[in-house]
Image (cartoon, rainbow, N blue to C red):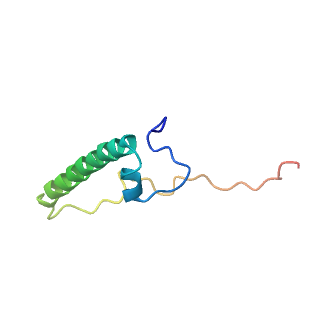
């Protein structure tokens, strides 16, 4: 049993991690379930986006229309070392 979940001094394979101890097995199942739910939500959202009618909508690369928002370079002496 580890003090903290995922506490190992070396890299384990997925199989080694699951079979390491009951805490690791439980932690793996929790994380795996959370990842599966996360992927499901992303794929569901992408499916919704694919159904949108975007004909005639201009391509947007930036949300703001700033053009070269940087200041001009000012040449001056360097700081002392």
Q: Residue at x 76, y 56 (%)?
A: 75
Count of picture labels:
0
**Residue sitting nearer the eye, 44 or 53:** 44
Whole-percent x, y for residue 80 in the image = 88, 48
Whole-percent x, y for residue 5 in the image = 44, 40
Is residue 78 shown left or right of residue 54? Answer: right
**Residue sitting nearer the eye, 28 or 50:** 28
Is residue 67 shown left or right of residue 55? Answer: right
Q: Residue furthest right?
A: 81
Q: Residue at x 20, y 52 (%)?
A: 40
Evaluate whether residue 64 shows in this view: no
Image quarter in which the N terminus is found:
top left
**Residue sitting nearer the eye, 10 or 42:** 10
Find residue 30 and report its image quarter.
Answer: top left
Is residue 35 shown left or right of residue 44? Answer: right
Q: Residue furthest top?
A: 3
Whole-percent x, y for residue 18 in the image = 36, 51
Evaluate whether residue 44 shows in this view: yes
Q: Residue at x 82, y 52 (%)?
A: 78
Is residue 49 shown left or right of residue 31? Answer: left
Q: Residue at x 83, y 48 (%)?
A: 79
Whole-percent x, y for residue 8 in the image = 51, 47
**Residue sitting nearer the eye, 65 or 39:** 39
């Amino acid at each position: 049993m580890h003090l903290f979940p995922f506490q190992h001094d070396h890299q384990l394979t997925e199989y080694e991690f699951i079979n390491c101890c009951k805490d690791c097995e439980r932690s793996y199942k929790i994380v795996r379930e959370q990842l599966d739910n996360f992927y499901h939500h992303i794929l569901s959202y992408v499916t919704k986006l694919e159904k949108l009618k975007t004909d005639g909508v201009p391509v947007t690369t930036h949300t703001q229309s700033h053009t070269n928002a940087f200041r001009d370079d000012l040449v001056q002496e360097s700081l002392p070392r």
